């Protein structure tokens, strides 16, 4: 999953864009700061402290409450990415060669932001615990699966559920490296990346067309972003909220140990929501947003 010189195949193309987006200013969400800010109006200090030190589920925070907080975050990120996308449509056709390649990374950056926020609310561990610029393979793998869920792929749904099961049973604070990089989940990561890379290629023409006419392009661009980003974020939220990992009443069975090599892949890789394949992008540089 590491970036190489050759990014012509869809899988490598997707990983290259994901890596570039993860390095953009403001993309990485500080888990502690976000949870403290997001839960401040709804939870006691003790609940917030335990949610940060352990997980929101361990703190006894109900999924219903987390859903409300998640919806607030989705609305904020959707409004921001739509506004930026509309601004990107203003220059018109003469700016296309300079803006379109950067647009993709910017849009993916906003997908990364909401993916992290939802993951932290629904009791996933810190995805960017390392302060360095790099992204480890396990994090790349789980983010790829999250994106697959956002695009409606069945195998990504199943794989995310399997990883969540490992985290829940092991009460783990780190992603299962073996399962995501060497185990049977890894082929699903690779297939998801290849699928997403193909979609990026297909979308490139539509992105350019939507920005070709000044002002009109801004309206179309912002509208397309709103109509694609919002349902993708809601799809990920629904899936993460429905996993046992997010449920305070779920208890890990004593003695349960999950090895990445014993997870069975039982879902086929098939897109379920074709309307999401026309996701638009944004062109202006990300501001340092509030978490």
Image (cartoon, rainbow, N blue to C red):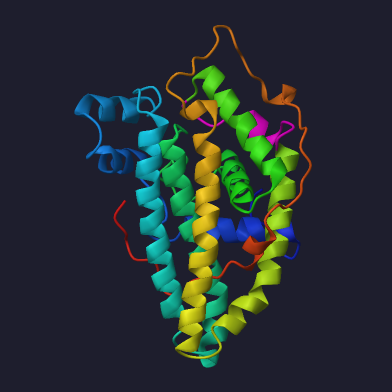
Is 89 covered by the magenta stretch? no
Vertical placement of 255 versus 35: above or below?
A: above
Can I make out residue 14 in this image? yes
Residue at image point 39% right, 45% down? 70
Which segment did they paint magenta? 173-185
Q: Is residue 109 left or right of residue 11?
A: left
Number of numbered discs: 0
Residue 3 quadrant: bottom right
List the single residue furthest toward the front.
64
Residue at image point 64% right, 19% down? 258
Q: Is residue 199 left or right of residue 26?
A: right
Q: Is residue 236 left or right of residue 34?
A: right
Q: Position of residue 276 (x, y in %)?
A: 62, 61
Residue 161 quadrant: top right
Is 183 covered by the magenta stretch? yes
Can I make out residue 108 in this image? no
Q: Position of residue 160 (x, y in %)?
A: 61, 36
Q: Position of residue 100 (x, y in %)?
A: 56, 77
Dominant SS in magenta: loop
Residue at image point 35% right, 57% down? 76
Q: Position of residue 30 (x, y in %)?
A: 35, 44
Vertical placement of 109 versus 234: above or below?
A: below
Q: Nearer the viewer, residue 270 or 171?
A: 270
Q: Nearer the viewer, residue 285 or 56?
A: 56
């Amino acid at each position: 999953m590491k970036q190489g010189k050759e990014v012509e195949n869809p899988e490598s193309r997707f990983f290259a864009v994901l890596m570039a987006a993860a390095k953009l200013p403001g993309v990485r969400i500080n888990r502690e700061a976000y949870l403290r800010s997001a839960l401040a109006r709804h939870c006691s200090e003790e609940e917030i402290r335990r949610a940060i030190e352990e997980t929101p589920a361990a703190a006894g925070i109900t999924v219903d409450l987390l859903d409300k907080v998640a919806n607030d975050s989705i609305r904020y990120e959707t409004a921001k990415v739509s506004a930026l996308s509309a601004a990107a449509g203003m220059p018109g056709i003469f700016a296309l060669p300079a803006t379109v390649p950067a647009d993709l990374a910017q849009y993916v950056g906003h997908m990364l932001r909401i993916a992290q926020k939802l993951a932290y609310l629904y009791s996933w561990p810190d995805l960017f615990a390392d302060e360095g610029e790099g992204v480890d393979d396990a994090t790349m793998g789980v983010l790829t699966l999250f994106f697959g869920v956002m695009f409606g792929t069945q195998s990504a749904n199943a794989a995310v559920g399997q990883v969540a099961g490992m985290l829940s049973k092991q009460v783990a604070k780190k992603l299962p490296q073996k399962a995501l990089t060497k185990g049977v989940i890894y082929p699903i990561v690779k297939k998801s990346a290849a699928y997403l890379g193909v979609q990026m290629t297909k979308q490139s023409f539509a992105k350019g067309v939507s920005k070709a006419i000044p002002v009109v392009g801004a309206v179309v661009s912002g509208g397309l972003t709103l109509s694609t980003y919002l349902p993708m974020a809601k799809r990920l939220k629904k899936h993460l909220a429905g996993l046992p990992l997010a449920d305070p009443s779920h208890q890990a069975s004593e003695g349960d140990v999950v090895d990445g090599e014993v997870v069975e892949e039982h879902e086929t890789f098939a897109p379920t929501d074709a309307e999401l394949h026309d996701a638009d992008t944004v062109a202006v540089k990300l501001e340092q947003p509030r978490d």
